[in-house]
């Protein structure tokens, strides 16, 4: 194939396509022309690649085809519209719809954790059996508080956000099996309960609650939401609503789970930033707790306000 002759023959079409791609507003006839030229140019690109793959021409035609495709599909506009709808409607509504599930999870988790704290604090022998006297002493005197300052704050925030997002993803993915979610909740309740019980038994309750509360309110709420939505998926499989088939009920609950998983990433980013920058900050305890509580209440208010709005 004579490349120069091929370029000369089709150059006017390519230039016209460039003009249409760059045009701000197109008439109906111009849109039809854009579609036709896009299809022809894609064919030209295929011919050039297979017969005379000139790098400069392939690059030019590839960019032109991509630009034309983007203009036709309107990808950027749709994307930002969907993002806005996700944060103002889809995510908060999915969280609010699952409120009975994650509300029950939060009540059960807090009750279990509180019981474990009381039991460990009231039974000194349990500390020896669970973690040992030396480890308990180190935890109370230095390691618990030191945990929040052992890493650089930016790295610590990334680490925490990633860990919590992964935990939430596990809860959502394993929700249909139910038991894995309950196991993850148990392990977290055991960890917090034993740690809190040790700190209380060493008269360090003020340190424990002063450090865990600022970020824990939002972080644990995110975990509760993930676990509740995961268990909701399992509930849809075990006992679907009468008006839905089992597969349809699971599909609807699963879609809600995907929305929640995406939104919780930002929730855990916020919780990670609080834990890395606010929790260890040299501020009065009341101020650190106040900052964490304000962010937590703002999140709950956002969920209620946006999630309860009617469809536009």
Image: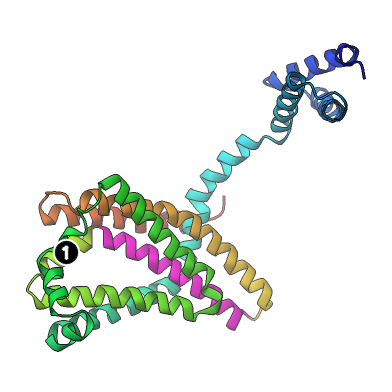
Residue 158 image offset from top left, x and y in percent:
36, 50
Q: Residues within 10 Å of mark 1 (few under 14, many from 20)?
A: some
Residue 33 image offset from top left, x and y in percent:
84, 24
In-image side of 311 versus 105 (left or right): right
Predominant secondary structure in magenta? helix
Quarter-wise, where is residue 213 in the image? bottom left
Region in magenta:
215-241
In-image side of 277 versus 161 (left or right): left
| Of 135 and 263, the residue lying toward us | 135
Indicate yes or no whether the magenta region holds residue 56.
Answer: no
Q: Is residue 220 visible?
A: yes
Residue 17 image offset from top left, x and y in percent:
78, 20
| Of 169 and 83, the residue lying toward us | 169
Callout 1: SS: helix
Residue 220 image offset from top left, x and y in percent:
33, 65
Quarter-wise, where is residue 51 in the image? top right
In-image side of 179 versus 156 (left or right): right
Residue drawn at (91%, 15%), measured in percent from left and top?
Answer: 2
Q: Residue furthest left?
A: 203
Q: Residue furthest right?
A: 1
Coloration mode: rainbow
Quarter-wise, where is residue 80 in the image? top right
| Of 14 and 56, the residue lying toward us | 56
Quickly name the residue at label 1. Answer: 143
Indicate yes or no whether the magenta region holds residue 232.
Answer: yes
């Amino acid at each position: 194939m004579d490349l120069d002759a091929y370029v000369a023959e089709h150059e006017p079409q390519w230039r016209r396509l460039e003009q249409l791609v760059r045009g701000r507003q197109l008439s109906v006839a111009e849109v039809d022309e854009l579609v036709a030229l896009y299809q022809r140019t894609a064919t030209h690109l295929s011919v050039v690649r297979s017969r005379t793959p000139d790098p400069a021409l392939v690059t030019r035609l590839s960019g032109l085809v991509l630009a034309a495709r983007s203009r036709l599909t309107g990808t950027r506009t749709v994307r930002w519209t969907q993002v806005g709808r996700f944060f103002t409607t889809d995510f908060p509504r999915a969280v609010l719809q699952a409120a009975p599930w994650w509300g029950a999870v939060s009540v059960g988790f807090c009750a279990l954790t509180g019981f474990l704290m009381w039991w460990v604090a009231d039974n000194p022998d349990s500390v020896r059996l669970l973690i040992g006297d030396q480890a308990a002493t180190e935890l109370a005197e230095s390691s618990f508080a030191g945990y929040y300052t052992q890493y650089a704050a930016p790295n610590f925030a990334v680490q925490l956000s990633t860990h919590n997002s992964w935990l939430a993803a596990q809860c959502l993915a394993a929700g249909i099996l139910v038991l894995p979610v309950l196991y993850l909740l148990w392990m977290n309740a055991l960890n917090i309960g034993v740690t809190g019980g040790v700190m209380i038994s060493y008269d360090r309750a003020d340190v424990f609650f002063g450090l865990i509360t600022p970020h824990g309110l939002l972080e644990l709420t995110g975990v509760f939401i993930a676990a509740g939505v995961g268990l909701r998926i399992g509930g849809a499989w075990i006992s679907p609503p009468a008006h839905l088939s089992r597969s349809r009920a699971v599909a609807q609950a699963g879609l809600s789970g995907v929305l929640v998983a995406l939104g919780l990433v930002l929730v855990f980013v916020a919780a990670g930033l609080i834990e890395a920058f606010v929790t260890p900050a040299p501020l009065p305890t009341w101020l650190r707790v106040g900052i964490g509580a304000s962010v937590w209440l703002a999140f709950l208010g956002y969920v209620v306000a946006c999630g309860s709005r009617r469809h536009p």
